[in-house]
Image (cartoon, grey):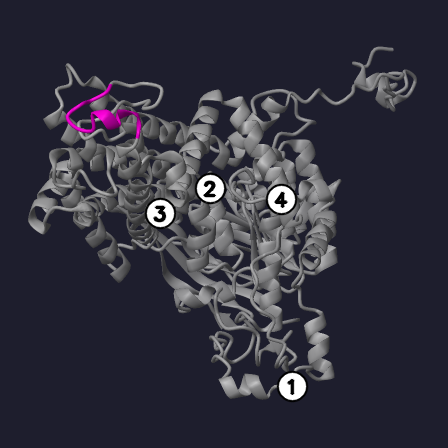
Amino acid sequence: MTEPILKVENLSVDYEVGAGVFRAVSNVSFTLSAGRVVGIVGETGCGKSTLGQAIPRLLPEPPARIRSGKIIFQGTDLVPVPKHKLPMVRGTSIGMIFQEPLNSLNPAFRVYDQIAESIQIRHWREIGDLPMFRPGPTPFDYSRRPMPKAEQVLTKPFLPGEKVQEAARHRLVSRDDYRREVLDYLRLVRINDPETILRLYPHELSGGMRQRIMIAMTLSQKPNLLIADEPTSALDVTIQAQVLTLMKELIDEVHASILFISHDLGVVAEMADDLGVMYAGALVEIGPIAEVFKSPRHPYTKALLRAIPNQYKTDGPLPSIPGNVPNLSRLPSGCAFHPRCPIARPVCRVETPQLPEISHAAACHFADEVANLP
Amino acid sequence: MNSTSGVGGTEGGTGVPIAGSAAPRVRLPPPVSRGRQLRSGAVGLYRVLRANPLSFVGFVLVAFTLILAAFVVFAPHLVAHYGAEQQTGVYNSAPTLFRWPPSFAHPFGTDGASYDIFSEVMLALPTDLGIGVAIAGVALIAGGGLGLVAGFWDRPGHLSGYTSSFIMRVTDVFLAFPSLILALALVASIGKGTIQAMIAIMLTWWPYYVRLVRGEVIAVKHLPYVTAARAAGVRETKILTRHVLRNVLEPVVVYFTLDIGTVLVIFSTISFVGVGVPYPSSAPEWGSMMSFYQGNYPFQIYWWAITFPALAIFVTVLAFSLLGDGLRDVLDPRSRRALAESAAHEPPPEANVGEPPVLTLPLGRDSPSGSAALGGAP
């Protein structure tokens, strides 16, 4: 068992808006091992995106606030890290693909400028011009190096040693260096005619193209952990299939661990090794994806799977879950799902079930009875 | 992003110092060469201007005004007569107390001292343009800078939030007074004169830019692409100076261009009231000219004396207004492309005139999937 790349422990995130406090994420724990893909599914407003953005600490604080918990990335807890050191982790260590391809590219810059900026950040971190997050005892102790003293600069030989020359040769300085790299990444995401695309503005591209350029930007930084927040939900089905195929190929190519957030069970089934199901801000079930699909252990998962439109069942209305998603500022007592649960008992109203630490876990008092549900 | 250069850094985590290879931290090079970029930019500008005739007029007028001003500054004798020449001119026989209406020799007429009003109006041009650009420019830099800071760093309950609210409250205090009245009051307190009047208007002018820029920054800073830049590891200062500033720039530059005209009018008004540029002077100003002529030359008889300085103000302000409208189209990449394409009248790409492609479906009538797809008919 390798060291997990990401370990989230009892993470709770609140939104403090006006008078109310919205418990967007409550007590979420999971582990993401290197090279794995964890899918997170749930209804709209269940806290998936908040969870995804909380990991690289991208949520605007305020209104968001990490109430408790740990986000242990490569052995370092990110929660107490001061704001000005966070850029070190983002990009090259934790990359992110957003759900709005239409707005996630800066309308004022050409495709080239956007990808080249990502490449430049990664490159400067690699050659040590910018501080970089590194796993280890002092991962954030890479503050600005002191300016070289004048006599140091003057006494340096004009032609540096062999190793130095080697490093200098790999510096990206000229236009051609950056252009070549940008073209490489555009080809990596299978964009036809990258030389033309390079010079276009985002509004001149289709949604699928923009999403692929977002992916190229993120991948060009070679992140260890990729958080894909509904990367395909704004696309139509054919483009969606292309992007998914592409991402699957890329997973093999870049060996990144991926946290794949989606509301589409089909998409997640395509991508993920493990599946986590969220309801009202809490992780209600997590396990290997085949097991969760075959024998769900939480009534919500069961109901969710039953609600997938099925080509074999053509008569009658689509099954749905009665009731509504609870208001996150006034969560029901006990198990948040009990008002809608077919097997709820009095104990569910009082006691909040915990997620046990087993491979296929469900936060339900009666997890064993779920198999008997229709 | 603006830390030190690469001296003494480490390479790829291997700890190899790359001393001495202090390549300068360069800006991102453009995708195509500068020359090509400039050329395509010029072509785009031309197309935009052609697509919008009014902004084309504004552009030409402003260019003409600037060229004229350059002539006045560097070769004044080509544009304006001076006193000595006037004394030997056509009106030499009646050097004083005679005011000639516009004629071929004096297109704007003359005033009582036989001064050529055309020359006066021309001599005032660089002064007025300089004053307009200087006041609006100072207001843009000071107000815009404050607006950027106030809009971008406004976390409530923190130092940034307090700074932001302080800036905005001071702005509100200034905006509570009508700026012309406030400027007049300031001039009255710091004394008459060109510089004093300019300082007074600058002091009342920056709050508009604070408000404009802050509003734009707040609108932009929550957009997904700013979050995306943050997620890519871009630092806050660079997000502000690169990602946010570039998207805020467009309305601000448009406003600035329109504002040069407004400032001109305000300054002329202050001069007209008699607390700005003195007249007659070696560097006249249109407002003070009008003030002088209005007092000494009744409009009913000597209509030309006041009409032509007024026309000069009108044309200059109009030129900048039209240019501002045109700039809005040039600066926004979306409308720029659309306009350039509509102006270019490019023919649609050649239709493929050969054989139409044969659409082949993998479904045969006999194959089971085919008959199923066609409704299961046998």
Residue A69 is left or right of residue A308, and the answer is left
Question: Label 3 to label 1, Cα distance in Å?
Answer: 75 Å
Let me know if marks 4 and 3 both belong to one chain: no
User: Spatial distance from mark 1 to mark 4, Cα to Cα?
Assistant: 38 Å
Label 2 vs label 4, nearer the camera = 4
Dot 2: few (<14), some (14–19), or many (≥20) neighbours within 10 Å?
A: few
**Place of residue B148 in the rendered image (x, y in percent of width and height, measured from the top left):** 34, 50
Q: Are marks 3 and 1 on the same chain?
A: yes
Amino acid type assigned to the residue bearing label 4 in the image: Gln
Residue of label 1: A157
- The answer to whether residue B319 is magenta is no
Mark 4 falls within which chain?
Answer: B
In depth, the one of A95 and A198 nearer the eye is: A198
**Precedes in sequence: disc 3 or disc 1:** 1
User: Do residues under tags 4 and 3 come within 8 Å of each other at their CB atoms?
Assistant: no
Residue at the spot of label 3: A349
Q: In this view of the protein, which residue sits in the foreground, A71 or A274? A: A71
